[in-house]
Amino acid sequence: MISVVDVKILLVDASLEVMNIKRTLESLGYEVPSVVSTGEEAIEKVFDIKPDIVFMDLDLNGDMDGIEVVSKIKEMDIPIIFQTNQLNDPKAKQAMEIKPYGFLIKPYGKIELQSTLEMALYKIRAENELRWNENRLKTGMDMADMVYWEYDTDKDLFTFDDQFFALYGTSADEMGGNTMSAQEYVERFVDPSAYKLMKKELKKTFEADDPNFSSTTRHWITRADGEKRYIVVRFKILNDKNGKKIGTMGVNQDITEQKKAKDALRESEEKYRTLVESAKDPISLYDVNGIFLMANKAGSVSMGMEPAELVGHSLREVFPPEIADKQIKLIRKVFSTEEGLELEMPVIHGNQTLWFSTSLQPVYGHDNIVNKVQVISRDITDLKETQIKLEQALDEKDLLMKEIHHRVKNNLMIISSLLNLQSSYIEDEDARDVFRESQNRAKSMAMIHERLYQSTDLKNIDFGDYIQKLTTDLYRTMVSDPERIKLYIDADDVKIDINTVVPLGLIVNELVTNSMKHAFSNNESGFIKVELHNKNDKIVLRVSDNGVGFPEDIDYKNTGSLGLQLVNSLTNQIQGEIKLEKGPGTIFTITFEETV
């Protein structure tokens, strides 16, 4: 809004009373920063101080009059108030055609001057407000991709605003101006698919008796560049000041993206509905209270009703209370967590237990909030019964395998006992040692089968614990003086498969037996150490002693010793590598990878 104190007036006057006019303007509260007497000075000051109003006499000093000055500064769009001595002067008539904001005939008084200025200010405020509203409306229409048009019935002429041509992919210059006939508009831009629709809507408009009649329609257009767009057209009757119908006015808005989104949504919904209806599995939609919102044919038939009959009914009306309450609890859980659930549910049907694999998934509304839950159930009774039978068969197989390992273990212990009994009848010490070694091998394998019998997972047998027991038993059997020979065990909790544990157990038996038998044959003191570790995805077994050392003249990979032959053969069986480190003492290292 403009107030008096904010108004700068450029006074352009060559008369003697110019200073009196200046003082009067200032007494009324206006600012008069400059007074000039020629047209040239006026033009210079206009561009310099940019006044709010130019108060100008038609007759000026110099070569230019007031009308010529206005023609030079018209692009500045500054309000002009003219004053003159003669109303009948031809210049006065020219000035009136310019449509100034005020016109004063000298001489005039202070009240006339004040009222003329106030009227000018009122007009300025009204124009500014109108301009602001128009800009605001234009901005809103631009943001909404809307264009304005009017149609004159008598002239058969459309008049479009500038934005119309941007929407239609062309320009006013290319179209020869902002107007065109109805036929020209239709032929240039309207898609043929919309001809009948437009004809119908226009007929309704022209036949309507209601002066406030309005209509909304949607149709395709073809832009000048060939692209098709979808628009919504809102129009109403245009009347003259006497209420006579003279045409229509309206706005067009590009809603192509909304149309595509809606079509895609509709297509998606149709595909979903087709998929749901054709599904053999029961599919239902529920609200938070377990009320049916939708059910497919498979779902409704399973409950003895038609799909339409289920809608609006509660789960409590269809299922027993304990089943319905459980399902409603699950539905509400999905609503609260916004996370789906997958579960298997037994349902008692008469004397039979039916099993269903049930999926509960949240369904979101337009506000991105869960507004329903989709439940898909599949009858897996046959599969479940097969699974139960298979689990029973596996349990029976496990029991059978345990029984086999138990019996093998018992048989091996019997063999060990027989060898022990037989050795008592042998007088030759070397022969007795052979029997004793065979007895230890049988006991070693018996211990393994005892582990297998006790284990619940034949793919992951704790071999570290087995080493502890095996080597301790061998130590107690073969070492008569524990103070002279010490046994150290450093075994990690290494899990080994059944296919590896048997040969590896025999390897440990042979290497430990070899150290206990030969490393301290002359009553020397020392130690035997057994290590088992998992390093860099490989399993390392090390059996070492600080005894007399391995004989230099014996090739451990090519020897007549049954024990070493077994160690080499069994190491190859588990696809491992064996390494011997000699003196002081002996170190055997077995390295292998455990494959699943």
Image (spheres, rainbow, N blue to C red):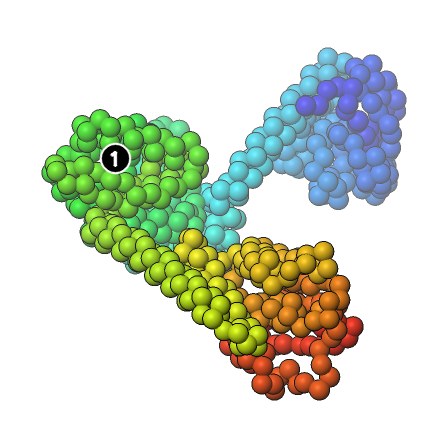
Answer left or right for 317 relative to 524: left
Point out residue 238 in the picture as x, y percentages from the top left corner.
37, 35
Seen from this angle, which residue lies furthest top?
A: 111
Q: Quadrant of the rendered structure where residue 209 is?
A: top left
**Residue displayed at 22% across by 50% down:** 385
Point out residue 191 in the picture as x, y percentages from the top left corner.
33, 57
Q: Nearer the viewer, residue 120 or 510?
A: 510
User: In the rendered image of this protein, does residue 412 appear above or below residue 395?
Assistant: below
Q: Quadrant of the rendered structure where residue 535 is?
A: bottom right
Q: Amino acid at mark 1?
A: Leu
Answer left or right for 368 relative to 325: right
Residue at the spot of label 1: 293
Point out residue 432 in the picture as x, y percentages from the top left corner.
53, 73
- Residue 491 visible in the shown view: yes
Q: Nearer the viewer, residue 131 or 439?
A: 439
User: In the rendered image of this protein, does residue 471 appear above or below residue 214?
Assistant: below
Q: Helix or strand or loop: what does disc 1 sit on?
A: strand
- Residue 270 visible in the shown view: no
The number of callouts visible is 1
Q: Nearer the viewer, residue 290 or 573?
A: 573
Point out residue 543 in the picture as x, y percentages from the top left corner.
66, 67
User: In the rendered image of this protein, does residue 415 appear above or below residue 100?
Assistant: below
User: In the picture, which quadrant includes the N terminus?
Assistant: top right
**Residue displayed at 38% across by 52% down:** 260
Q: Nearer the viewer, residue 518 or 154?
A: 518
Answer left or right for 584 relative to 212: right
Q: Residues within 10 Å of mark 1 (few under 14, many from 20)?
A: some
Answer left or right for 439 relative to 310: right
Q: Quadrant of the rendered structure where residue 223 is?
A: bottom left
**Residue displayed at 53% across by 38% down:** 140
